[in-house]
């Protein structure tokens, strides 16, 4: 048959492994709207694509379309023959009666899957705390999510499609997953498409971005950070185009009124202008001013924990003699493994947790507000409409030193006029979370506790929430597994480790390092405990030809040898310390530049900047000492 040549098919035939899958002129209709129209795109081998966009714009639908789970109403989906696709949806299809082992590795015998180092790494990274022979039906929602993710990752796939893979994962599991996906394929092989609101994760694993908006896909090169820069440039060019159109209209009006056509030259702009847009942007938060305002609202005392100890049913201490001072205007992030005691710590801070020992001192002016994970605080509104709810709030609240009305807050949090007529019970998860946050701010608390506030929010709404919190004058405590949100909104991070609250000057990276060190120490202790038994067994065979324990003799005899895992851990520590030191040196330069620009008579600001520099230098010294110690152990 005749007709025009098919460029996509010709590409596939010319280079069968370059193109993996895609769609051509695809249209997807839902009963109430058209999701995609005339959509043509392709996924090549080696692609690492992050998919972002507002909730409801079609990110999950795009994955399902390319995976063949949704049929287009027009156009077609194309897949190169033999390409295998693995999909992680937002809901699992695990069977409750299966054991975890069967759900993950199927009927494969143990000697087969246990011999695969990749499978062992996946099980250790995601399922270490889940009973291998336990029933799937007895697992929590987060544990089921990890089992489903492990099930997918143990398979061999040419293309992986992940829909919100970091949901229910703690910070360490997210870090492991990012490393696994970076190393899963060789460069130029395999393909990854991931939908997530975790911006740190997108930067770690993606080399390009697709923005879903307006029934189309807009591609961007680079990870999430590069995508934001390119969006700024795109918006700048759009503003210039609109300005040019307005100028043309004004010239046309002038010609009509004066009888002469105005002349104008076309200005030339460079991509570097996008950076100029942010050159004069002030710091995210004026920390000194926010602390001053917080102290005016709170006084000097907020919450003091003195030897606070919490035990449940006579077991080990969840919190073990914790001493912690939380002051006015402090913005603290709290990290820890699932079950480490984060919720218990928050309850203790509020004075509602019974203590086995110690005490909690709460300032007289403290007014707590809590945004919980399950949004229980919205239940009282039932089927009332949003406009009815905000109509009960006539007061204004202070943000960025300015008064804001409920309507202005709603607009900043992405609510449209149509949303105002929606019953609260019918709002999406993201809308409910934003509404709950707004109602909390209107109640004007002075200590705000946020438990996973980023759940159900897309990246644009996360940025809007962050912007809102930047101007909030009070004490902020944040629990989240989203490390980008954690380090963006808080000034200091703390970890719950072995029942203690530990400051993390190096942020989440330091927490991950501490957990790795503890695990390695525990593994060495376990190995040392079994060494005598192994020594007896080894002595029996030492007289055999070529016998012995395989250790080197000569000058190295008697010297402790590092295992391959220990060597890798030390080299990873050295590389991490080099990177952290470089980051700290950059911060020192920035602080010195700020000192040069500061008012010479502002001794408070100058003193704080100097203290920052000294703290950074101390951290660099510690990192260098750790680096040298690791190098000595490696003999380098």
Image: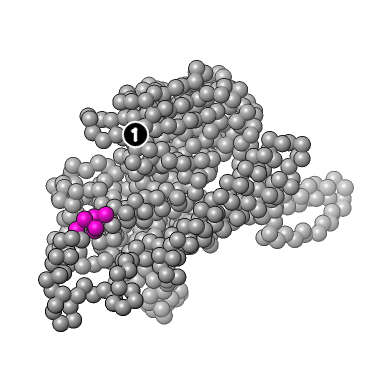
Q: Residue furthest bottom?
A: 545
Q: Nearer the viewer, residue 41 or 436?
A: 436
Is residue 360 shown in magenta? no
Q: Is 1 placed above or below 72 here? A: below
* Residue 120: image location, x then y, percent: 25, 61
Which residue occupies the foreground of this view, 222 or 495?
495
> Residue lying farthest left?
540
Q: What residue would you read off at disc 1?
A: 320
Query: Which quadrant does the C terminus fall into?
Result: bottom left
**Residue 27 at least partly seen:** yes
Q: Residue at x 26, y 54 (%)?
A: 525
Residue 74 visible in this rendered orientation of the protein:
no
Query: Does the magenta stretch mainly form a helix, a strand or a loop?
Result: helix
Q: Is residue 352 above or below residue 19?
A: above
| Residue 69 falls in image quadrant | bottom left
Viewer-proximal residue, 540 or 114? 540
Q: Which residues are magenta?
A: 525-530
């Amino acid at each position: 048959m005749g007709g025009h040549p098919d460029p996509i098919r010709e590409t596939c035939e010319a280079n069968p492994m370059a193109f993996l899958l895609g769609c051509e002129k695809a249209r997807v209709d839902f009963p109430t709207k058209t999701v995609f129209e005339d959509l043509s795109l392709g996924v090549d081998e080696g692609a690492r694509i992050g998919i972002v966009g507002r909730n409801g714009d079609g990110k999950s639908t795009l994955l399902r379309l390319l995976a063949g789970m949704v049929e287009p109403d027009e156009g077609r989906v194309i897949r190169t023959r033999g390409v295998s696709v693995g999909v992680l949806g937002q809901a699992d299809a695990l069977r409750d009666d299966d054991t975890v082992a069967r759900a993950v590795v199927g009927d494969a015998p143990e000697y087969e899957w246990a011999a695969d180092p990749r499978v062992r790494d996946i099980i250790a990274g995601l399922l270490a705390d889940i009973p291998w022979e336990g029933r799937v039906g007895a697992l929590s929602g987060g544990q089921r999510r990890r089992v489903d993710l492990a099930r997918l990752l143990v398979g061999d796939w040419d293309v992986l499609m992940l829909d919100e893979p970091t949901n229910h994962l703690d910070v360490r599991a997210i870090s492991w997953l990012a490393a696994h996906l970076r190393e899963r394929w060789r460069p130029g092989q395999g393909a990854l498409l991931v939908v997530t609101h975790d911006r740190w994760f997108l930067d770690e694993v993606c080399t390009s971005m697709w923005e879903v908006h307006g029934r189309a896909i807009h591609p961007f090169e680079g990870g999430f950070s590069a995508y934001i820069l390119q969006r700024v440039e795109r918006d700048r060019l759009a503003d210039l185009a609109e300005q040019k159109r307005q100028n043309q209209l004004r010239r046309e009006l002038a010609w009509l009124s004066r009888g002469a056509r105005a002349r104008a030259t076309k200005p030339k702009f460079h991509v570097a202008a996008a950076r100029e847009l942010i050159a004069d942007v002030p710091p995210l938060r004026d920390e000194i001013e926010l602390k001053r305002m917080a102290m005016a609202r709170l006084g000097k005392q907020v919450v003091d924990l003195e030897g606070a100890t919490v035990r449940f049913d006579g077991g080990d201490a969840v919190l073990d003699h914790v001493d912690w001072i939380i002051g006015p205007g402090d913005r603290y992030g709290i990290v820890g493994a699932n079950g480490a005691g984060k919720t218990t710590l928050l309850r203790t801070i509020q004075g509602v947790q019974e203590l086995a020992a110690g005490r909690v001192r709460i300032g007289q002016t403290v007014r707590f507000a809590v945004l919980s994970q399950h949004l229980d605080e919205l239940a009282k509104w039932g089927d009332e409409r949003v406009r009815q709810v905000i109509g009960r709030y006539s007061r204004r609240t202070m943000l960025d030193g300015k008064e804001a009305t409920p309507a202005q807050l709603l607009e900043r949090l992405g609510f449209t006029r149509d949303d105002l007529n929606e019953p609260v019970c019918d709002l999406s998860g993201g809308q409910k979370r934003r509404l709950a946050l707004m109602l909390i701010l209107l109640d004007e608390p002075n200590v705000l506790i946020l438990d996973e506030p980023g759940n159900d929010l897309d990246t644009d709404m996360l940025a809007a929430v962050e912007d809102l919190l930047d101007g909030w004058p009070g004490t902020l405590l944040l629990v989240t597994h989203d490390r980008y949100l954690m380090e963006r909104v808080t000034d200091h991070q703390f970890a719950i480790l072995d029942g203690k609250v530990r400051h993390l000057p190096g942020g989440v990276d330091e927490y991950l390092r501490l957990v790795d060190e503890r695990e390695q120490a525990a593994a060495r202790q376990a190995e040392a405990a079994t060494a005598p038994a192994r020594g007896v067994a080894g002595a029996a065979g030492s007289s055999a030809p070529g016998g012995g324990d395989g250790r080197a003799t000569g000058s190295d005899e008697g010297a402790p040898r590092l295992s391959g895992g220990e060597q890798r851990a030390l080299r990873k520590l050295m590389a991490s310390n080099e990177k952290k030191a470089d980051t700290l040196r950059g911060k020192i330069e920035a602080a010195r530049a700020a000192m040069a620009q500061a008012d010479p008579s502002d001794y408070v600001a100058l003193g704080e900047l100097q203290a920052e520099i000294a703290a950074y230098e101390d951290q660099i010294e510690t990192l260098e000492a750790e680096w040298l110690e690791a190098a000595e152990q490696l003999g380098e």
